[in-house]
């Protein structure tokens, strides 16, 4: 059946999407960081480092939580995550130094991010074993939708109030959203399957799954892990410095750059939902080749041009970036099953976290050494090319095994 206690599973998927809408708030950090640097004269490298550090903290949280979440009440982990994530933004609004800002945003909100992200992805996978790509696409599209709305709204708050006030208001919004959606965040009963689906249609059955130890013994896990890093690095490079890139390479002012940050996230949303749904129909590998290939080609374009050409290339990179998350998530569920999805995805997601550190760090280092972001796109294109090679090896291995 598609319901439990009268609640259709589609509503539960919307609650998962809402969780990622909140965690997607970290994608607009470039809007806050640019404003905070201008307001207080803080060091840009220290402030932008908050983006990467949050990902590290969220990953550590996910790895720890993943060992227990499949046995926990997911509603409790959901509300804990929401309170911590929202509170991190609120406390950051009171920060009087870069260190205080990073502790609040990266540590408090980062732990909340880990709770929300893993809980939402675990719940959606368990309710939709028959539509893995769709579930991943809808859930993770929340993170792409968030900056579309929050980037321009936050800039309005910044322009009319202050960066600190904007952080506090956004934090309150997150807490309210999670509180309203918490009752929907319940896992299906053991052995539940969707109406009309037997689990024998070529998909991995809902009650099947490799343990994390078993998954880690599979050579293609490590190859897919590398692909994930390579596919997501370009997008994280862009989102970690989106506002500044749009201003320096695109030639736009701060307000226009904030709007463009939202538009870039809209492109990510297209990739999150569109490429994941497409992968349900044509398989996972063609979308993954598209994702890594786009990052190679568009990275080269960004390294050679300025103005509108860069913006178009950034949009395509973000389409690929959005798809990297959802298609890799669906691939992980398909390869190793949904039974231990929380633990397994928390390990695979480490690849994304590594990319979230590598991407913005490359951009910061190249900007500092050359005064431009263009060299960073050369580096990201090379990294994406490695992903193309790793994908080819996975395909060859699976064909040989078949």
Image (spheres, helix red, strand yellow):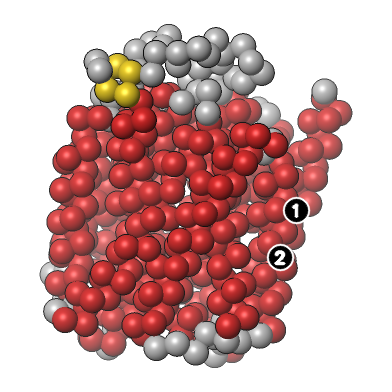
In the rendered structure, the answer to whether residue 9 lies left or right of residue 235 reads: left
Identify the image quadrant of residue 4: top left
Q: Quadrant of the N terminus?
A: top left
Location of residue 391 in the rendering, given as x and y in whole percent from the top left corner: 74, 45
Location of residue 296 in the rendering, given as x and y in whole percent from the top left corner: 71, 65
Which residue is under mark 1?
Answer: 388
Distance from the alpha carbon under mark 1 to that under mark 2: 9 Å
Q: Secondary structure at mark 1?
A: helix
Nearest the viewer among 340 and 249 is 249
Q: Secondary structure at mark 2?
A: helix
Precedes in sequence: disc 1 or disc 2 = 2
> Badge 1 local density, few (<14 within 10 Å), some, or many (20+)?
many
Location of residue 337 in the rendering, given as x and y in whole percent from the top left corner: 56, 23
- Do callouts 1 and 2 mark residues in contact (Cβ within 8 Å)? yes
Identify the image quadrant of residue 292: bottom right
The residue lying at 25 percent from left, 70 percent from top is: 154
Location of residue 53 in the rendering, given as x and y in whole percent from the top left corner: 39, 60
Which residue is under mark 2?
Answer: 296
Nearest the viewer among 14 and 294 is 14
Q: Is residue 28 above or below residue 114?
A: below
The residue lying at 43 percent from left, 9 percent from top is: 191
Residue 176 - label: none
The residue lying at 41 percent from left, 41 percent from top is: 139
Q: Quadrant of the C terminus?
A: top right
Q: Is residue 10 above or below residue 287?
A: above
Q: Is residue 45 above or below residue 147?
A: below
The residue lying at 53 percent from left, 31 percent from top is: 132
- For the question of whether residue 297 can be seen, the reply is yes
């Amino acid at each position: 059946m598609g319901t439990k206690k009268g609640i259709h599973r589609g509503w539960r998927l919307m609650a998962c999407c809402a969780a990622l809408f909140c965690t997607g708030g970290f994608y607009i950090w470039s809007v806050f960081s640019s404003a905070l640097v201008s307001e207080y004269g803080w060091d840009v490298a220290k402030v932008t480092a908050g983006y990467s550090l949050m990902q590290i903290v969220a990953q550590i949280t996910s790895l720890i939580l993943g060992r227990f979440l499949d046995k926990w009440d997911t509603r409790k982990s959901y509300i804990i995550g929401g309170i911590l994530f929202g509170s991190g933004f609120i406390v950051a609004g009171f920060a009087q130094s870069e260190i205080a800002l990073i502790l609040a945003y990266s540590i408090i909100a980062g732990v909340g991010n880990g709770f929300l992200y893993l809980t939402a992805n675990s719940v959606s996978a368990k309710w939709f074993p028959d539509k893995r790509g769709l579930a991943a696409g809808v859930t993770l599209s929340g993170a792409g939708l968030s900056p579309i709305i929050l980037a321009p709204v936050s800039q309005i708050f910044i322009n009319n109030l202050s960066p600190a006030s904007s952080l506090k208001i956004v934090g309150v919004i997150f807490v309210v959203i999670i509180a309203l959606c918490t009752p929907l965040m319940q896992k299906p009963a053991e052995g539940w399957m969707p109406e009309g689906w037997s689990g024998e249609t070529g998909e991995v059955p809902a009650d099947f799954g490799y343990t994390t130890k078993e998954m880690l013994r599979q050579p293609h896990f490590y190859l897919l892990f590398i692909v994930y890093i390579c596919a997501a690095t370009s997008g994280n490079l862009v989102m970690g410095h989106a506002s500044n890139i749009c201003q320096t390479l695109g030639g736009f002012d701060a307000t226009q750059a904030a709007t463009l940050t939202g538009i870039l996230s809209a492109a990510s949303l297209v990739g999150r939902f569109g490429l994941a749904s497409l992968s349900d129909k044509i398989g996972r590998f063609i979308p993954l080749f598209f994702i890594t290939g786009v990052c190679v080609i568009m990275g080269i374009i960004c390294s050679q041009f300025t103005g509108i050409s860069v913006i178009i290339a950034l949009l395509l990179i973000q389409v690929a970036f959005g798809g990297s998350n959802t298609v890799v998530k669906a691939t992980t569920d398909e390869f190793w099953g949904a039974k231990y999805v929380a633990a397994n995805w928390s390990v695979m997601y480490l690849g994304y976290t590594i990319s979230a550190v590598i991407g913005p760090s490359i951009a910061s280092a190249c900007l500092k050494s050359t005064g431009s972001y263009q060299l960073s796109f050369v580096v990201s294109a090379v990294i994406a090319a490695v992903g193309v090679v790793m994908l080819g090896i996975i395909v060859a291995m699976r064909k040989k095994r078949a």
